[in-house]
Image (spheres, coloured by chain):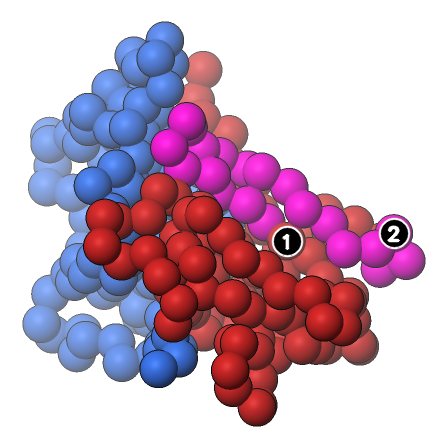
Chain colours: A blue, B red
Amino acid sequence: MQPEIRNILTSLPPALSGESFETIAGSDTVRIERIVSNGQATPEGEWYDQERDEWVIVLAGSAGLLFDGHQEPQRLAAGDHILIPAGCRHRVAWTDPDVSTVWLAVHFAAMPGTCGPC
Amino acid sequence: MQPEIRNILTSLPPALSGESFETIAGSDTVRIERIVSNGQATPEGEWYDQERDEWVIVLAGSAGLLFDGHQEPQRLAAGDHILIPAGCRHRVAWTDPDVSTVWLAVHFAAMPGTCGPC
């Protein structure tokens, strides 16, 4: 049997069903995840503070990513990617309210010595 | 300092410079790689036979992926992704000759028990 081809930009969940998180591949050391946002943001005052490194790319739509200690979110659109080191507090300030924003995230153990605030 | 945003679809190497392989993030257990092809294919009769699992997505362009024992390559276009288990012999039968094909590949240790021919 051949490995199955799937498309990350199709079979999107209905916008009204909220933000969607789906693990699409991985192992015990890495997790590859599709996130679909429809205007959602991290709740005000809350931050992601992760134990693992996260590499993330926006494949469709757009979003604003805010890092702790900074005033303005950075805008990500299709093709934009960023490595968020473990311990680097961040929040999603906004996602496009009009179209689905499709993120691909790869979570993996932090490299020794790279963990810490950004 | 904030993590830096880069774009995976820009700063493509010149088509004439051949196929390009660039590690863009990773650790000792995972490697995230951008591959840019311009019509290249795996040399006739050669196969990839990898010790690690590889999850791969085509972000631009198109390509044909052939698995050992099968007659016809499977076509991948933008957004199409596939998990190639370790030990699953495969080759790139073709890539788009007219536009750059941008692949994102994530290489990681095979899950115990999943290694083997496909």
Residue name at image x 32 percent, y 48 percent: B110
The chain identifier of the residue carrying mark 2 reads: B
Say which residue label 2 marks. B17
Residue B17 locus on image (x, y percent): 87, 52
Say which residue label 1 marks. B35
> Which quadrant of the rendered structure holds the N terminus of chain B?
top left
Residue name at image x 76 percent, y 55 percent: B19
Residue name at image x 11 percent, y 30 percent: A45
Mark 1 or mark 2, which has the lower sequence index?
2
| Residues beneath discs 1 and 2 located on the same chain | yes
Residue A32 falls inside the magenta stretch: no
Residue range corresponding to the magenta coloring? B15-34
Residue A58 numbered mark, or none: none
Residue B18 falls inside the magenta stretch: yes
Residue A63 locus on image (x, y percent): 35, 51
The residue furthest right is B16
**Residue nearer the viewer, B81 or B67:** B67
Residue B79 locus on image (x, y percent): 46, 71
A30 left or right of A13 in image = right
- CA distance for labels 1 and 2: 13 Å
Which image quadrant is residue A1 in?
A: bottom left
Rendered position, A41 above or below B48: above
